[in-house]
Amino acid sequence: MLCLGIESSCDDTGVAVVKDGQIMASLLASQIPLHAIFGGVVPELASRAHYNNLAELFDELCQKISLKPAQLDAIAVARGPGLLGSLLVGVAFAKTLAWTLQKPVIAINHLHAHLQVALMGKNMAYPCLGLVISGGHTELYRMESPTSMLRLGRSLDDAAGEILDKAGAFVGLPYPAGKAISDLASQGNPLAYPLPEPYLKNDNLDFSFSGLKTAAVNLAQSLGLHRQTSQSRLADFCASLNHALVKTVTTKCARALEQEKDLQGLCVAGGVAANPMLRNSLRNLMLAANGAFHCPPPELCCDNGAMIAYSGYLHARNGLRHKLDFTTVPRGKKIPEDAIRSSAGE
Ligand code: KG4
Ligand code: ZN
């Protein structure tokens, strides 16, 4: 079974083909240079770049694996959450391809797909805890199976990656700053500057990172990091920020394990999951809890087409598809459960 995956929810255009649950090829056109000068993703520019990149990237993918589009069994596309204009480019492409080839289309929840690809080929015991931590989202899920998940908590404001990107931009690190911050953090003292571990004095599983962002920017200003770069001070700053973030996220994951006592393991995905200190902290948490821990390699942590193709494969394997008129869902809106059985007509 050959499933195409199309990802265009933010600033990466991704296409991939999964054959019987294995990634055959995956191509990515990153827009980082386009947005770097603005210090963040400019939605209008992102959708134009997806529009310019997508058809060519799909052709390149077909050539790479000698694929004729008619050989595809299903076409999966990220329907949300994300930037609406960007999503619409991928969704319009997928619907056109599906209609032209008369193949089923499958509308994918981008956040579920992050977790599903993280567990690809792994023997995870369920139920388990799923953490998606990226530039746009920080969410905790109870996963009953790879395809059945219940959201337990989410960020009420900024995502974890967003605060790294914003604080990093303030001290002059290139966009997106998450990797630079985690690299510099490894050379600094995590206890150099006290930063708040926010939104822990409650009993819920939601996050709120905007206060940490403000505290980090205020600290950087008081240290003069936005004017000159003393490498060791900058490293201490990054280590302290990273430490506060990692401790906060680990505390909420520990709380989820306390509240949902039957969880067998933890799966973490999304761009910030590439952060080695976060991975270590969560791995240690699961070691202490006697549970499994899975995190994909860094190239699968960030947005990519393979996660959408793999999620599409899981749907198709369960006999699920979508009608051609499925909706595209921006960030903050609920994604409908509107998959249909493959035997049902469109
Ligand atoms: O999943 P992703 O590619 O896109 C979104 O859906 O947001 O995640 C991108 C985010 C950015 O905020 C970036 O700074 C962060 O992931 N990131 C990292 C690392 N690599 C990327 N954050 C911390 N440590 C890293 N090594
Ligand atoms: Zn993502």
Image: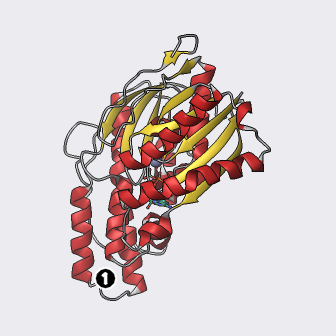
In the picture of the structure, the residue carrying the numbered disc 1 is 225
**Residue furthest out toward the right:** 66
Q: Position of residue 110 (x, y in %)?
A: 46, 39
Relative to 90, is 83 on the left or the right?
left
Relative vertical location of residue 56 with respect to residue 307 in this rendering, above or below:
below
Residue 116 falls in image quadrant:
top right
- Is any part of residue 250 visible from this angle? no
Residue at (33%, 32%) from the top-left corner? 152
**Residue furthest out toward the front:** 100
Quadrant of the snapshot with the N terminus:
top right
Relative vertical location of residue 36 with respect to residue 89 in this rendering, above or below:
below
Relative to 66, is 100 on the left or the right?
left
Q: Secondary structure at mark 1?
A: loop
Residue at (63%, 21%) from the top-left corner? 317
Ligand 1 within 8 A of label 1's CB? no
Q: State the residue in front, 334 or 162.
A: 334
Q: How many marks?
A: 1
| Colour scheme employed for the rendering of this structure | secondary structure
Q: State the residue in front, 174 or 44.
A: 44
Q: Position of residue 282 (x, y in %)?
A: 47, 47
Residue 307 falls in image quadrant:
top right
Residue 313 falls in image quadrant:
top right
Residue at (43%, 27%) from the top-left corner? 326
Crowdedness of circle 1 by 10 Å Cα count: few (<14), some, many (20+)?
Answer: some
Q: Position of residue 206 (x, y in %)?
A: 27, 41
Relative vertical location of residue 69 with respect to residue 249 in this rendering, above or below:
above
Q: Position of residue 164 (x, y in %)?
A: 37, 63
> What's the amino acid at mark 1?
Leu
Relative to 124, is 278 on the left or the right?
left
Q: State the residue in front, 324 or 313.
A: 324
Residue at (59%, 17%) from the top-left corner? 319
